[in-house]
Amino acid sequence: MRNKLAKGKLLLCSGCLLVSAQVLAKDKAQSFDQYIAEIKTEAQAKGFDESLIEQAFAKVEFHQRAVVADKNQPEKVETLDTYLPKRVPDWKINRARELYKKHSDLLTQVGEKYGVQPRFIVALWGLETNFGKYMGNYNVISALSTLAYEGRREAFFKKQLWAALEILEQGHISVDDMKGSWAGAMGQNQFMPTSFISYAVDGDGDGKKDIWGNQADVFSSMANYLKQEGWSDELTWGRQVKLPEGFDLSLAIPKNTGSRKNWLAAWSRTEKTLAQWQALGVRRVDGTDLPNVDITAALVFPDDENGRVYLAYDNYKSLMHWNLSYYFVSSVGHLSDRIKFPPIK
Ligand SMILES: [Ca+2]
């Protein structure tokens, strides 16, 4: 009898929990709907056409996974020596070289127009989406709405939403085909909507900037990004170097500068000519002299002074604008070097 009662209580209790979980889920859904209603009003106030707004938000959904992914970005527990072989494995190098060859006419044309060596376009393409294979399957309006609603970076994601509406308004893509990552990075080059507005171009001249499906648009948009951010095809990205014993480590950019602004300030404070670095005892990783060219470079430690050391050339700054991450930039540089050597026949 006592057992039965206890069991009955337990059942009743789990029933209560189930009901309250459903109520919570419903509350959450309702408040997301309310949030979308507010967003739509705000979009109207910004001057977007009412039918465009209705169409854009017609199938909007709250993506629980987007929020979970945003809160669980992996912490870095690697060094560049363990990271690079995983991020730039041999198969990816081979694939990059194959695709470089396959698209060489288009790449040469785009590279000359924008002044960007094609190997960097292919390297970025490979690292962002495995050469267009993994663009993300989230509806961008839903992903951005979810992240704005979640609130941790509401202002940022609302800005991305307005940019996404502008892209739809300009007719470059339909709402249903506007797919991206959980964070709203879109297409084969993973441009956030504001980057699309700033850098995307119509490479094939059909009137649309289609970074999802048109190869000329994808390559041209990437090259245009780099060019707008100061790229020079007379330089490479940087090179791995060796430091002499007792080297003054304060000559390098500190590891964690906290922001792009601080990082650029540290660059300006520490950059020197290659001749000056040579005089300080810095050498190529094989021990030979640095190139005898009149350019400046800054010293970076993606891990710390015991890890890999690089002399970074001005183009490194353009790549750090694309993604403020030493690991990302090192991967792009490394892959681009492997596309260059040995020469593709
Ligand atoms: Ca186009």
Image: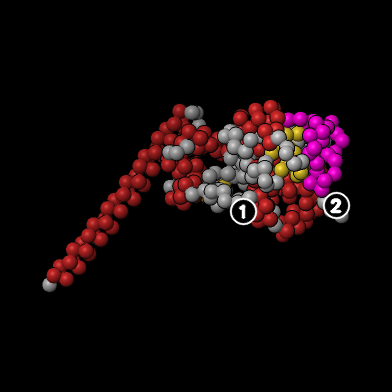
* Residue in view at x 58 percent, y 44 percent: 185
Q: Is residue 167 above or below residue 20?
A: above
Q: Are marks 2 and 1 in contact (CB under 8 Å)?
A: no
Q: Of residues 182 and 162, which is closer to you in this image?
A: 182
Mark 1 belongs to which amino acid? Tyr
Q: Is residue 309 left or right of residue 39?
A: right
Q: Find residue 282 and report its horizontal and vertical position in percent.
A: 78, 39
Give the quarter of the image for residue 173: top right
Q: CA distance from mark 2 to mark 1?
A: 28 Å
Q: Nearer the viewer, residue 283 or 57?
A: 283
Q: Quadrant of the C terminus?
A: bottom right
Magenta region includes residue 287: yes
Q: Secondary structure at mark 1?
A: loop
Q: Earlier in the sequence, mark 2 or mark 1?
A: 1
Between circles 2 and 1, the one closer to the viewer is: 2
Tag 1 residue:
134
Q: Position of residue 234 (x, y in %)?
A: 82, 36
Q: Is residue 43 left or right of residue 4?
A: right
Residue at point 51% right, 35% down? 156
> Mark 2 belongs to which amino acid?
Pro
The residue that appears at 15% across and 67% down in the rendered structure is: 5
Residue 121 seen? no
Res 168 → quadrant: top right
Where is the N terminus found, in terms of image quarters?
bottom left
The front one of 223 and 212 is: 223
